[in-house]
Image (cartoon, grey):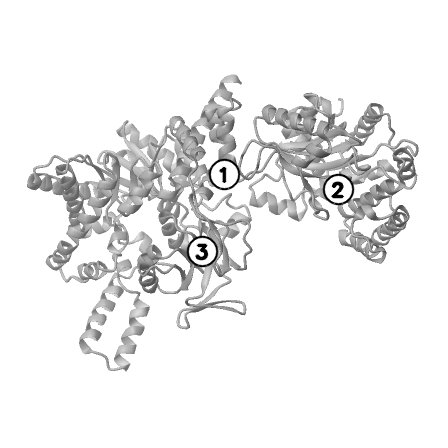
Amino acid sequence: MPNKKYVYLFEEGRAEMKDLLGGKGANLAEMTRIGLPVPPGIIITTEACREFYRLGRQFPPGLEDEVREKMRVLEEKTGKRFGDPQNPLLVSVRSGAVVSMPGMMDTVLNLGLNDQTVEGLARLANDERFALDCYRRFLTMFGDVVLGIERDRFERVLEERKEEQVIKYDYQVPAEDWRQIVAVYKRIIEQETGKPFPQDPLEQLFMAIYAVFNSWNNDRAIVYRKINKIPDDLGTAVNIQTMVFGNLGEDCATGVAFTRNPSTGAKELYGEYLVNAQGEDVVAGIRTPMPISKLKEDMPAVYDQFAGICDLLDKHYRNMQDVEFTIERGKLYMLQTRNGKRTAQAALKIAVDMVNEGLITKEEAVLRVEPAHLDHLLHRRIDPNARLEVIAKGLPASPGAASGKAVFDADEAEKLGNDGEKVILVRTETTPDDIHGIVAAQGVLTSRGGMTSHAAVVARGMGKPCVCGCEAIRIDYEAGEFRVGDLVVKKGDVISIDGATGKVMLGEVPMIEPELSPEFRQLLEWADEIRTLGVRANADTPEDAAKAREFGAEGIGLTRTEHMFMAPDRVPIVQEMIMAAGEEERRRALDKLLPMQQGDFYGILKAMEGLPVTIRLLDPPLHEFLPNSEELAVELTRLRLAGGDPEEIKGKEEILKKVRALHEFNPMLGHRGCRLGITYPEIYEMQARAIFRAAAQLVKEGRRVIPEVEIPLVGELNELKITREIVDRVAEEVMKETGVKLEYVVGTMIEVPRAALVADEIAQEAEFFSFGTNDLTQTTFGFSRDDAEGKFLHEYVEKKILPEDPFMVLDRKGVGKLMKMTVELGRRTKPDLVIGICGEHGGEPNSIEFCHEIGLNYVSCSPYRVPIARLAAAQAKVKAKGAYAASQTV
């Protein structure tokens, strides 16, 4: 049986062979195929790397013979011989994974040099200094990259010699000094490894290949793969390419360029180069490179050829390219091309421009922009050129950036915010009691909590920056300060937070205001043409609803009525309702809340005129609206010791008694949702009346409104039957009292596993389902979200027990299976049943793709994520279409 082919000449490959040849190798092969000036070379496949690891870090049988054979082909092509002292062939060795990975092995240049070939190179170039410079570079790279010797050992020798000779730049070092430096470098290698530097070029080559394969599993690469969710079993290719020299004199150069501007997306060549330099000099920053436009003056013919090649690559790959090039004695060589990294602004502009230039389709343009790119553009961000004094780092919980005075109390944040002061609310963690402070603050910083903690969810909903779980800060509420190590930040000191990176900075930092470019709007218009999944928003105020509409929401998928109960002027009335001794007293308190709730619903329904608005009836347990029992007990003790007012003490004792009576061991699974509505039907009755009276008022004003009343936490058909009867009865009463015919529907949230299992029964009484995937994830896994995220979830992800945090990215295997079952069972009973999702997952691209796949009607997310959801829904449709087309061609 013949050996597997592990080594390819450049001309044997093409762009489509990326999985086998790695990204770099496939692109070198493609450039060779289309006739560009690429120095010849060979590629060792990723398959060889995988086999190397399978065999316990041994080269696969036949690999070395194949490399020797292909090196002979390179010798024939170039007329040079590997190891020939008269006319030596020199090569560069680079890693090249399927996915670009900065953590991988660095390049080795000038491989093939030894004590004999360096003399041959000097004669051929007629330049001894140049040849010895190449040799010392090779020794440095080989020592560092292949042998693992600290690069600094070599650099120190060079720096000391330059200081002795009062020389600033490497290219000023004379030949004799290079000769002495080379001798020192070889001694360092022997000291560090116990062996002399290998003089045999083939031995050098196989050691370098071994080092590339080995680097696939170095610490940098493993960490990079983990962060970027790159599989560990892809392996890396090895690219071996004939050397060309940009450091032979003034008619030589080396550089890096982009076929379009990677910052703005403008269609212009962008990059820089150095005359008389090797590739590493451009990125090392020792000499200041010149802008690519200067090449037009220095070497006009080469510039014209280069500009033509860049234009060809841009059109051939139909994407902005990042290219590396070398000019050797006036002749241009292309060393690499790959899709260039770009800013969010550039990604949008390039995608839209390429459609207008006829290079790509609208569907391709939609796939070219990452949904996360839009997130950056929708929020204020820190000026990338600003100098920052970073004092701590937490979790990037809600994008955007803000500066303001540190404030530790929500009431004070509200007061200062209303007075026009800019504040950052700093808390250990936030609770629903802090909502008014969050509204008034520019941003939120917490020392505890995860990416789906209360602060994170609320801030994202409001489009405010938030940094959570910043454990480095120690908050002292009494002293009104927080500490980071020895640094003390007092109340009133200005701090800045960056919700996109999690950084906390001292002082005010310069910001860039968001602006929605014409390209932004154009791309989203195309996304809307393509997608079939609807996009709604979660909004609790008319302002949020208006913002959602502005961002393209097609309705409200969740209005949380409990947030309305948290307003400072309402909390006493809500508490009065909870403290009531019986139904009559409770109804009196509810009568006071009724006009307030009616006003809330009037504002939201009006803002979303003509579009559906899903209003969830009260969901959290009642104790959430009462003071904390421990704080109350402390307050009572203080009052008693101080001989406080007996009436006040009595009142607080009553509240404490009620708080303790309402205490639950596991409130998330306790007396909440529809269970509250069944025990205290008057609460749901008041809310339904407020909804329908607001709707009737708007209908009388000539507006079309579509309220959707949502019953939370249903897990049994009878729960929905009982609560639905309340809603329908109140609707009838309001229609009779106002003489207005109302258009409304009643449905439920699917947030406990039992609801999914009996969805066919529940569908008998529901006109819509909406997945509350935050709670459904908790109840499916048996996780308490705050505890799980704070204590062990990060470890589960790190140890690959779970691929992602299931509160961030929908768990398709478990929660997803329940969702799929719900859709199938529900539509078996009611084929036209409307089904959506309103958890945090509704704005996460991977989860949106799954929602498209299982046939949901819409996703709902915070207003600022609506554009992201619109784009992700279009991408899901394009990908599904592509998968279907591919399946038809098999």
Residue type pointed to by label 1: Gln
Could you tell me if residue 850 is visible in this image? no
Disc nearest the viewer among 1 and 3: 1
Q: Nearer the viewer, residue 729 or 491?
A: 491
Residue 283: x, y in percent?
A: 69, 44
397 on left or right of 54: left
Q: Nearer the viewer, mark 3 or mark 2?
A: 3
* Mark 1 secondary-structure assignment: helix
Query: Which picture quadrant has residue 161?
Result: bottom right
| Image position, residue 89 (x, y; %) | 85, 32
* Residue count near mark 1 (Cα–Cα under 10 Å), binned few <14, some 14–19, many ≥20: many
Q: Name which of mark 1 and mark 3 comes first in the sequence.
A: 1
Residue pointed to by mark 3: 468
**Dot 3 lies on which element?**
strand
Which residue is labeled 2 in the image?
Answer: 211
Between 342 and 445, the residue placed more toward the observer is 342
Q: Is residue 855 above or below residue 380?
A: above
Give me the C-alpha separation between circle 2 and circle 1.
38 Å
Give the residue drawn at x 75%, y 42%.
Answer: 211
> In what element is the residue under mark 2?
helix
Name the residue beneath numbered marker 1.
345
Give residue 615's quadrant in the image: top left
